[in-house]
Image (cartoon, helix red, strand yellow):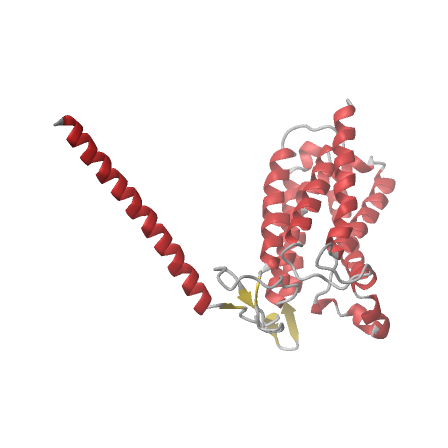
Amino acid sequence: MRKAQNARKKSVVRARALGKAYNARHFIFLLGAFAFFVMLIHPQFDPVAVSLGPLSARWYGLMYLLAFGQFWLLGRLRLSRAGWSAEEFDDLLFYGMLGVVLGGRLGQVLFYEPAFYAARPWEIFAVWKGGMSFHGGFLGVLAAMVWHCRKHGRVWLEVADFVAPLVPLGLMFGRIGNFINGELWGRVADPGLPWAMIFPLTDGAPRHPSQLYHAGLEGLALFIWLWWYSGAPRKRGAVSGMFLLGYGLFRSFVECFREPDHGIFGFSYVVSMGQWLSLPMILCGLWLIWRARKTTQT
């Protein structure tokens, strides 16, 4: 009698499990069918966010304003621990802003679109249209940090370790600006992908919203990791190395879903320009982490 009851209970449990599995598969099927027939379309935001008479503020510029604003706020939270004065930090921010804008624009001109800007040199100054290279901006910030170190007598890696955790959220805002502008879209995606999106300026095929992948990984995820990692005392260069490694790996991964750019190394779906430029960052990051493990100086 007990054996029959146990067998009946097992059959009931098995039937419920099969029912749940069927319902899950049915839900996934319906979700895929919905995504296939109802495709997301990029909303084509008005590039002008606010307009007051002859004056207007564009979304892309506002994203940069938010990026610099969060850098200032986060930096203020750690000034005392790092032994910095507010005046010195503001000085670093000023030169860093110049490095981001000038380096980012020159990087776009030299790394990605040299022929276009050679034929239209006046377009170099049209920064409100977008077209800023992270790797160029990164080199510009490095130059600004060298100048700051010479001016204030600081060790370069000390400054880099302080700056690194303040950067990723700014990158996130920049990628959101790319998405609002409808630029730097992703590769063609499976039509069944629920978040595949049609960008009106392309061929009409559903694509990965790679700008949001960049924002989530190089921005938010990298910030969470670096803010936690730098919260404890680390050896000099460790935080900078972790930033370089993390950004390089995240950028290289997202490039697999992003439509490749025409760079100085040509157009390729195998190794993109962004991946070529991220490779030195990965190698330098690994070296800095290895170097930090070998040294006793914090």
Is 38 displayed left or right of 256 in the figure?
A: left
Q: Horizontal and vertical percent for residue 213?
A: 59, 54
Using the image, determine if residue 290 lies above or below residue 151: above
Q: Horizontal and vertical percent for residue 215?
A: 61, 53
Is 194 displayed left or right of 109 in the figure?
A: left
Is 206 displayed left or right of 230 in the figure?
A: left
Q: Is residue 257 visible?
A: yes
Residue reaching furthest to the bottom: 53
Q: Looking at the rendering, which quadrant does residue 132 occupy? A: bottom right
The residue shown at (40%, 59%) is: 31
Q: How many marks?
A: 0
In this view of the protein, which residue sits in the foreground, 210 or 6?
Answer: 6
Q: Horizontal and vertical percent for residue 48?
A: 61, 71
Residue reaching furthest to the left: 1
The residue shown at (80%, 56%) is: 103
In this view of the protein, which residue sits in the foreground, 190 or 155?
Answer: 190
Residue reaching furthest to the top: 296
In this view of the protein, which residue sits in the foreground, 293 or 22?
Answer: 22
- Quadrant location, the N terminus: top left
- Quadrant location, the C terminus: top right
Using the image, determine if residue 121 lies above or below residue 213: below
Is 172 displayed left or right of 103 in the figure?
A: left
Using the image, determine if residue 221 lies above or below residue 29: above
The residue shown at (84%, 72%) is: 121
Q: Is residue 298 visible?
A: no
Q: Horizontal and vertical percent for residue 53?
A: 62, 77
